[in-house]
Amino acid sequence: AMAGRGRGRGRGQMTFNVEAVGIGKGDALPPPTLQPSPLFPALERRAAPLPGGEEGEYMLALKQELRRAMRGLPYFVKPGAPRRDIERYSDKYQLSNPVDSAIDWNPDWRRLPRELKVRVRRLRTGGTAPLIPKQRISLDKEEAIKKLESLEKKEEEVTSEEEEEKEEEEEGKEEEEEEYDEEEHEEETDYVLSYFDNGESFGPDSDDNGDEAVY
Amino acid sequence: MTQAELRLCSLLLQEHFGEIVEKVGNSLLRTGPRPLRLLVGDTGLLVDQVKKALCVLIQHNLVRYEVQPRGSVEYEARSERILRILRYPRYIYTAKTLYGDPGELLVEELLLHGHLPMSSVVARVADRLTETMEDGKTMDYVEVSSTFARLADTHFIQRCPIVPDIPRSAKAPPPAAPALAIAEKDMYIVPRLSLVGKGKRRHSCDEEEEGEHKAKRQKQEGASSETPPDDGIYWQVNLERFHQHFRDQALVSAVASRTDQTSSEVVRTMLRMSEVTTASGASHTQPLSSNEIFRSLPAGYNIGKQVLDQYLALLADDPLEFVGKSGDSGGGTYTVKVTRGPRASWTPLSPFPHPSLIPPLPHRFGSRCARIFRLLLRKKHLEQKQVEDFAMIPAKEAKDMLYRMLSENLVSLQEIPKTPDHAPSRTFYLYTVNVMAAARMLLHRCYKSVANLMERRQHEMRENKRLLEKSQRVEAILASMQATGAEAAQLHEVEEMITGPERQQLETLKRNVNKIDASENQVDETIFVLESFIESTTKRP
């Protein structure tokens, strides 16, 4: 106890010898902090540049492609479309929406707890849509960049085609009223369904996790 | 689990599987293993939604289940495994470097779907490869199958545990959940399938009606109702094996930077020979005789046997102890030390498994701080004055740096009393680096960093949502116009729908998103090193 006294007049008393850590006699300690640290503190020095190179570019493209691909797979579980208040003409042309009570792929139920079994909705593609294939032959940097650009274009091409091909076969008597034979209806219209906008995305009941652009 | 890890797991689940799966995963991560009904209550989701989410999570090995003694099933999230989603690009890229395009796509498909039967994944990959080939050419299943077999032989992919074949009596009720199991020895056996076929193109026909119907028919044939020959046998990626590969790579490059190319090739050869015989937690490889090593050197390496022996001796003598001599038979037997024992010395050149704790430092604290840090690693304990002297940094600056590192827990103070009364004036105060604490702190920071990066990236996308959607619509219109043979002028008109400033904005967005994504990859590399280091150090023999 004695050791602490008489040391460091005019500043706080510490349990250890402040001189040992280099605070000389008479040095002022920094003032106490009275507020939480800033959310975006000033950067003292710039971050080091990212390592570039083929490997980095390729892994970047892979990462973005994976993200895009996974959003399109049935493992990306979306909430079922809310029931419409009124039946609308445009409903006939809406592509099939996710449905809460059915699963869009076919798990091997033998490997899962029995309590998890959900009705499987049979999509024509047999469960999981095949992945949009990518050209990935060389690791050339230029190609990687071109690839990034063409990825966007290709996705658009194939998505619109894919949606035209997608249809539901009526199977079993358990079908919900929301499911219908799209093929029949699709051939009746010349419109490209992928950009049919019935104006409902404006306003309070717009779906926030609707088709989001993915980079 | 720390908050940082939880947050990161949440973001990863949400980004790859959506919010419903995220909610379920979150509930399991935060509150621990629970049964279905509690999950439904917790998350406020519909029962079917929770069931679907669990199916997805189990399919991807992110959640496991266990039948409780009372008969109910409990689900448990595998947080560590969820974090590995961040590393998927690295696994896929590595497969590409080792086994080319088929290898790359095989690993990718397995990661995307969690697990698949061999017949299924081979067909998918053949189809995808066929798409990239010239018109008229197709990828044969045989080539894809053989790459699959190589991946299995080198343990990069493995069989999933299987449903037990228990004959059940008619009276006994079926179990609530199957008890899946597999013996280690069976994990890598490739089923003898005669997978015959070639990849199919999706757009093999033009937009003729007939063509479309033909394609539809083909698809239906593909999704046949007959059971595949390898029914019930599923394959998954063996992440641990990839991690072993990354460690080997780091070791080889550490040897190369410390000595020379040839030494690193010798070590690489030794590691390659031991690939499948080294257990995943082992501290060193099985002993290899120098004769065996000599025979296994890559074709291009024309070093004589004596020269090899000299290299081996040098490597064994090196204080960094990459290689140890274990015996004299067969010209001398050697092992590669994969992890370090507690007596290994620390040096600034320490590569993995002495991770470079140093790289993050200069960028945050400055190169002088890094110098002090390296010094403390080397000398272990130093007084304030000694730090100033050895590092050749003026007292005031050194003080400042030490305090900053002290406040961040990168260094700590140790008291060594000279007298029994512990009087401060008669006590040594020594600075030291507590490596494990520092590693853990940095790792925690890394998790936080990636989570922040992801949030920022999502924010950028949300801010530009309308513009991105507009851009996509324009692309779609352009694509369909091109397909129907529109003129250049018409195309140009449509392109103009995106104004100059908007194009600029899109460019900036793309640049930023790319930078953030690349940073996430970068941080995961550091996460790997730190996690491996912590794991190997806590597992003392």
Image: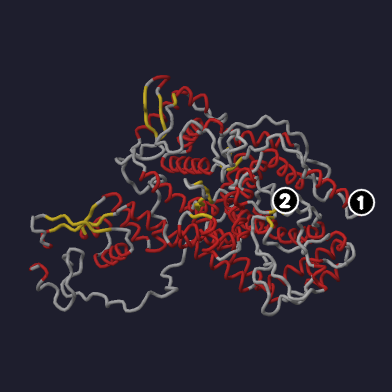
Tell me the crowding category of disc 1: few under 14, some 14 to 19, or many 20 or more residues within 10 angstroms, Cα based: few
Locate the C terminus of chain A and report the quarter of the image it occupies. bottom right
In the foreground, B463 or B165: B165
| SS under mark 1 | helix
Q: Quadrant of residue B288?
A: top left
Disc number placed over residue B301 in the picture, else none: none
- Residue B483 horizontal/vertical position (percent): 85, 61
Mark 2 sits on what residue?
A127
In the foreground, A97 or A4: A97
Q: CA distance from mark 1 to mark 2?
A: 24 Å
Q: Three-letter amino acid code at disc 2?
A: Gly
Q: Is residue A215 visible?
A: no
Dot 2 falls on which chain?
A
Q: Residue at x 84, y 50 (%)?
A: B216
- Residue B104 horizontal/vertical position (percent): 64, 44
Side of B391 where A175 appears, left or right: right
Dot 1 falls on which chain?
B
Disc number placed over residue B210 in the picture, else none: 1
- Residue B496 horizontal/vertical position (percent): 78, 74
Q: Residue at x 50, y 27 (%)?
A: B303
Q: Residue at x 56, y 49 (%)?
A: B90
- Residue B279 horizontal/vertical position (percent): 46, 34
Tell me the crowding category of disc 2: few under 14, some 14 to 19, or many 20 or more residues within 10 angstroms, Cα based: some
Q: Nearer the viewer, mark 1 or mark 2?
A: 2
